[in-house]
Image (cartoon, rainbow, N blue to C red):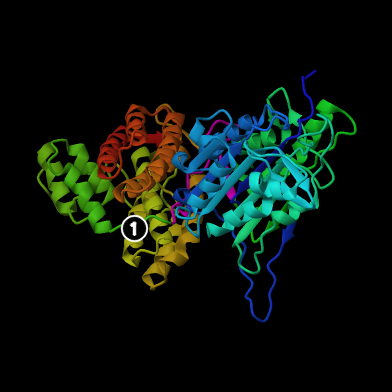
C-alpha cells in the first residue's frame, strides 16, 4: 500500500490565464443589456510570446508556529516544467519562486508582490498570465489569506494584512497588469497552519469571492478559477510523490492524460480529467470518507475549443502540426522578398539540384527561366521553352504533368511533391491568417494545386478558395477553408506506401507544413522558442518515416543556443534542398 498521508496544513493556489469550460463547471455567461453588447467567448490562447507565468511553492516558513510542508516546491517545479514542455510557455517567461531556490527567488511576500507588479510592464493586454501558489492558506474574520515564507500568523487581521497576502490583494495585483485573460487554480488542503496536523481546514466561500473576476464590467476579458476541492471539503497530499493529488493529476493531464483522439488537451478536457481522477485516486488510497472533488468558476471562455497542449498520440505518430492560430503576432511577409532571399542562397551554386528545388517551389517564379537554363547547362541539354518540365526541373516525360485529378492514377506518388505541397499549403494558411495581399495566397495555392493534381490528389478544396480569391474575396476570410483543406490533404495522404521502404505520406506532407512555418518565422526574425518547438515536431515527422535528422538536430541546437533570423533561414533552405533531393522518387501505394 502506498505511503500516503493527508496534506499538512497546506494550500496550493495556482492562477493561470486559460479558457472556460462548460458543465460540469459553473460558468458566468456574458449578459446583454441595452448598454452592453454580448461578446463572443474566447476560444484560443494568445501566441506563445504573450504567455507569462509566476509559479510559487512555499515549504519552509520563518515563523516557527507555521507547519513546515514537504510538497509545495515540488508542485511548483513540476507545474512550471509542464507549462514550458506541454503548454507552450517560453522558458524565459516562467518565473519560479520556491523554498529550494536561491535567495532572489525565495517565495517571500516582497518577492511575490514585486514580481506581479513588474509584470504590469511586460504582459500585454491581449496576453496570458499564469500565477501559481503552493503553500499554506488561512481564513480570519471572513477574509482569505495566502502565506508567503515570511508570513506571521495571528488572529490579528491587521498583522496578517501586513505579512500575509490577502486574496483580494493578489487579485488586485493581477488586475493591474491589464492582462485580458486570467485563470485561477486553487489547490487547497486548508488544514490550519498552526493547528493539529490532521485538523481539517476546508475551502470556504471567502476564497471563491476573492478570486472572482467581473467579465461583464470588463475587469478582464475572460477568467477561469479552478479549485482542487469543493467548498466545505479539504484536499489531500499524495505523499508518495511529495505533491498534492490535484497538482499531480493536473500535470499528468497536461502531459497527455487528458488528450483527445487527436492528441489535443483542451481546457474542458483537462478539467474533466482532474474531476474524474482526483476523487477516485483519493478514495482508493485514503479510504471511505475522504472526499476531494475539484470544481471551477468560469467567465468569458469556451473551454471545449481551447487547446492548451498538444502531445504525441498513443500510436507514437506525431499529432497535428502547430497551426497558424499559434502565430497571430508574426509580421506580414513580402513574398517577393522571400523568393529573392531563397534565390540568393542558391544562385552561385554548382549543384543542379538546388535549382531544381527552386523550380519545384516557385514554378512560376521570377527566376524560373534562369533556373531552368542553369539546370540545362549542368546536364548539357539545350533549352527548349516548349519542353515539359518535371517538378524536379528535368525535361522529359518521366513524371506525370498537371492534369485533371479525377482521371489521374492515385496508385503512385512523388515524395518530393508531397513535401513541397505541404510547404505551400502552410505558407498559404499563414498568409491568409495574416490577411496578406490576395495575390500572395494565389501564388502559394497555384503551386499546391499543380503538385496535388500531378499526384492524382483532388484539388476541389483549394480550387474553391482560388475562385473566391480571384473574385476579390478578403484573404482573412479564407483561413478556415485553408485549415480544412490542409486537414483534407492529411486525411487523403494517411496511407503507407512503398518508397521503397514503407512511408506514411501524411507525415511527409506535415513535415513540409512545419518547414513552411519555420521558414516564415526565421525569415521574420521571429520567436526562436517557437522555431525550436516546431523544429522538434518536424524532427518527429522526419524520424517517423526513417528520414535522417542530423541536420535538423544541428539546427535545433543552434536555435536553442540563440541563433535566429536569416542564419536559421539560410540553413533551413539548405536542409530543405537536401530533403527534396532525397525524396525525389516514386512511391507505390
> What type of secondary structure mainly makes up the magenta span?
loop
Please say whether residue 308 is one of the residues in the magenta stretch: yes
Residue 259 colored in magenta in the image: no
Position above or below: 283 against 267? above
Q: Front-most of 231 and 106?
A: 106
Q: On the rendered structure, is 522 left or right of 262?
A: left
Q: Is residue 441 left or right of residue 45?
A: left
In the rendering, at what x and y percent does residue 147 appear? 67, 41
Q: In this view, which residue lies farthest toward the top?
A: 1
| Rendered view: 332 above or below 509 | below
Within the image, what quadrant is residue 434 found in? bottom left
- Viewer-side residue, 225 vs 479: 225
SS at mark 1? helix
User: What percent of the width, then of the height, locates residue 6?
Assistant: 79, 29
Residues 442 and 236: in front is: 236
Residue ID at (46%, 67%): 477
To which residue does mark 1 refer? 446
Q: Is residue 315 above or below residue 361?
A: above
Q: Is residue 426 above or below residue 317?
A: below
- Which stretch is magenta? 307-328
Q: Residues within 10 Å of mark 1 (few under 14, many from 20)?
A: many
Amino acid at each position: 500500500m502506498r505511503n500516503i498521508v493527508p496534506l499538512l496544513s497546506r494550500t496550493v493556489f495556482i492562477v493561470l490565464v486559460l479558457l472556460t469550460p462548460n458543465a460540469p463547471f459553473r460558468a458566468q455567461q456574458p449578459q446583454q443589456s441595452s448598454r452592453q453588447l454580448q461578446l463572443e467567448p474566447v476560444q484560443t490562447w494568445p501566441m506563445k510570446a504573450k504567455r507569462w507565468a509566476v509559479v510559487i511553492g512555499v515549504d519552509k516558513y520563518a515563523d516557527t508556529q507555521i507547519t513546515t510542508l514537504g510538497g509545495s516546491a515540488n508542485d511548483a517545479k513540476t507545474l512550471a516544467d509542464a507549462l514550458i514542455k506541454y503548454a507552450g510557455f517560453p522558458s524565459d517567461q516562467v518565473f519560479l519562486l520556491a523554498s529550494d531556490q536561491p535567495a532572489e527567488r525565495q517565495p517571500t511576500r516582497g518577492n511575490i508582490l514585486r514580481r506581479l507588479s513588474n509584470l504590469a510592464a511586460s504582459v500585454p493586454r491581449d496576453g496570458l498570465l499564469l500565477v501559481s501558489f503552493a503553500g499554506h492558506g488561512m481564513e480570519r474574520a471572513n477574509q482569505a489569506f495566502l502565506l508567503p515564507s515570511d508570513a506571521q500568523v495571528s488572529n490579528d487581521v491587521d498583522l496578517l494584512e501586513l505579512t500575509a497576502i490577502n486574496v483580494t490583494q493578489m487579485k488586485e495585483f493581477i488586475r493591474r497588469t491589464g492582462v485580458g485573460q486570467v485563470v485561477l487554480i486553487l489547490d487547497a488542503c486548508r488544514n490550519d497552519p498552526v493547528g493539529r496536523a490532521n485538523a481539517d481546514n476546508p475551502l470556504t466561500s471567502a476564497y471563491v469571492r476573492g478570486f472572482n473576476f467581473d467579465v461583464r464590467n470588463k475587469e478582464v476579458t475572460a477568467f477561469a478559477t479552478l479549485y482542487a476541492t469543493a467548498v466545505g471539503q479539504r484536499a489531500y497530499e499524495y505523499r508518495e510523490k511529495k505533491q498534492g493529488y490535484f497538482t499531480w493529476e493536473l500535470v499528468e493531464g497536461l502531459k497527455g492524460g487528458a488528450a483527445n483522439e487527436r492528441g489535443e488537451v483542451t481546457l474542458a478536457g483537462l478539467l474533466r480529467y482532474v474531476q474524474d481522477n482526483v476523487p477516485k485516486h483519493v478514495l482508493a488510497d485514503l479510504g471511505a470518507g475522504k472526499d476531494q472533488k475539484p470544481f471551477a468558476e468560469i467567465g468569458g471562455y469556451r473551454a471545449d475549443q481551447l487547446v492548451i497542449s498538444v502531445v504525441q498520440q498513443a500510436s507514437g505518430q506525431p499529432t497535428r502540426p502547430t497551426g497558424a492560430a499559434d502565430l497571430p503576432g508574426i509580421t506580414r511577409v513580402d513574398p517577393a522578398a522571400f523568393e529573392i532571399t531563397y534565390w540568393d542562397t542558391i544562385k552561385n551554386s554548382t549543384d543542379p539540384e538546388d535549382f531544381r528545388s527552386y523550380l519545384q517551389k516557385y514554378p512560376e517564379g521570377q527566376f524560373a527561366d534562369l533556373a531552368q537554363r542553369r539546370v540545362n547547362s549542368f546536364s548539357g541539354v539545350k533549352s527548349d521553352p516548349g519542353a515539359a518540365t518535371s517538378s524536379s526541373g528535368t525535361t522529359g516525360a518521366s513524371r506525370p504533368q498537371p492534369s485533371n485529378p479525377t482521371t489521374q492514377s492515385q496508385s503512385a506518388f512523388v515524395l518530393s511533391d508531397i513535401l513541397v505541397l505541404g510547404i505551400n499549403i502552410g505558407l498559404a494558411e499563414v498568409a491568409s491568417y495574416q490577411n496578406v495581399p490576395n495575390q500572395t495566397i494565389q501564388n502559394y495555392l497555384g503551386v499546391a494545386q499543380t503538385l496535388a493534381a500531378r499526384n492524382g490528389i483532388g484539388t476541389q478544396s483549394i480550387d474553391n478558395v482560388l475562385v473566391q480569391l480571384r473574385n476579390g474575396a478578403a484573404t482573412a476570410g479564407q483561413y478556415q477553408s485553408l485549415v480544412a483543406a490542409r486537414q483534407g490533404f492529411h486525411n487523403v495522404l494517411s496511407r503507407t506506401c512503398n518508397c521503397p521502404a514503407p512511408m506514411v505520406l501524411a507525415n511527409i506532407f506535415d513535415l513540409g507544413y512545419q518547414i513552411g512555418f519555420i521558414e516564415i518565422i526565421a525569415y521574420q526574425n521571429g520567436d526562436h522558442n517557437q522555431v525550436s518547438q516546431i523544429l522538434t515536431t518536424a524532427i518527429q515527422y522526419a524520424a517517423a518515416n526513417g528520414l535522417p535528422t542530423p541536420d535538423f538536430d544541428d539546427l535545433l541546437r543552434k536555435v536553442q543556443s540563440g541563433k535566429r533570423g536569416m542564419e536559421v533561414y539560410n540553413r533551413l533552405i539548405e536542409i530543405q534542398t537536401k530533403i527534396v533531393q532525397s525524396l525525389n522518387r516514386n512511391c507505390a501505394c
